[in-house]
Image: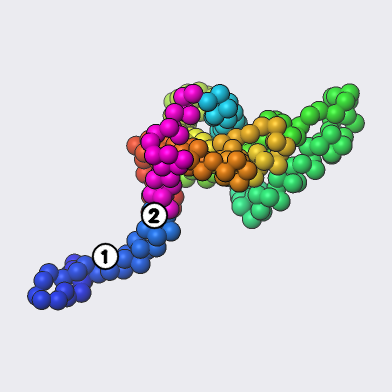
Amino acid sequence: MPRLGFPARGGASEVPANLVLLAPAVLLLTFAYALPVLGLLVLSVTDPVPGFGNYEWLLSSDTVHRVLWNTARVCVITTVLTLLGGYLLAYAIVHGGGRVRGGLLFAVLVPFWLSVLVRAFAFVMLLRREGPVNSMLMATGLITEPLALVRNEVGVVIGMVHYMLPYAVLPMLANMFGTDRRLSAAARGLGAGAFSTFLRVELPLSMPGILAAGILVFVFSLGFYITPAILGGGRLILLAEYITFNVLQNVRWGLATMLAASLLVFVFMALGLLSRITDLGRLFGAK
């Protein structure tokens, strides 16, 4: 295949056309992303005084420890519940009929069309003490008084699981559709029951999709701000909300940028782990 390019001045070797075409995107990413991130890293070690004093808060501050623990706990719970619900949905979509598959896919994709702010306020109305969820539970006799389902960790987890469910279903669907369905048929033909076939054939084959979805959900959950702020009601502070508080209220830019930089490093480490488990290009639709 001939190499396309543009001639350089002075008889130098030609410039590849793909580099010329990529130049605007590279410049855009440099000025819109790389330079702000570099500024964030510089600010984290220069404000209020040069040094790594801000990073010492990761080891010495009880408040930072509590925020990090709240964030890690909520994200782990969200990831586990999202994977359980997402796997059931993905399995039902793969093995369901045409109408069932279309209906479930529509239900999974609908949240993408709704604003996260609208969904958060909708859950406040649904889960409040006088809301339809508590009213239905009391009408059926399952509870005698309203449950506290909002403005606490329970409400935050419910809202985050609902938001993250499509991000778990889609990677697992891609993995399940890519497996050879004849292996399950062969296992049943050799005498394995439905549960044994699932446990020994289908579940191991779907494990890469589960791991990829788990890392993806966990990484996305780390940066949640609107859902915890609204459904938590100020009683549960996660990392993103704490960073915003230090920027807008405490005006402690050094501490805020240190936490943001630490979060960024952790996310890159998680994506590096994800790249060893699955093809990131295929996962994000590049192939």
Classify residue 15 as left or right of residue 53. Answer: left
Q: Is disc 1 placed on a helix, strand or loop?
A: helix
Classify residue 182 as left or right of residue 170. Answer: left
Q: Which residue bears the numbered disc 2?
A: 35
Which mark, by number, is residue 19?
1
Q: Residue at (81%, 37%) from the top-left corner?
A: 128
Q: Residue at (50%, 37%) from the top-left corner?
A: 255
Q: Is disc 2 placed on a helix, strand or loop?
A: helix
Viewer-proximal residue among 182 and 261: 261
Placement of 8 over or under 214, stated as above or below? below
Total marks placed: 2
Colouring scheme, one of rainbow, by chain, secondary structure, one colour? rainbow
- The answer to whether one can see residue 157 in this image is no
Placement of 28 over or under 253, stated as above or below? below
Placement of 286 over or under 97, stated as above or below? below
Q: Residue at (75%, 46%) from the top-left corner?
A: 122
Q: x%, y% of residue 216?
A: 48, 40
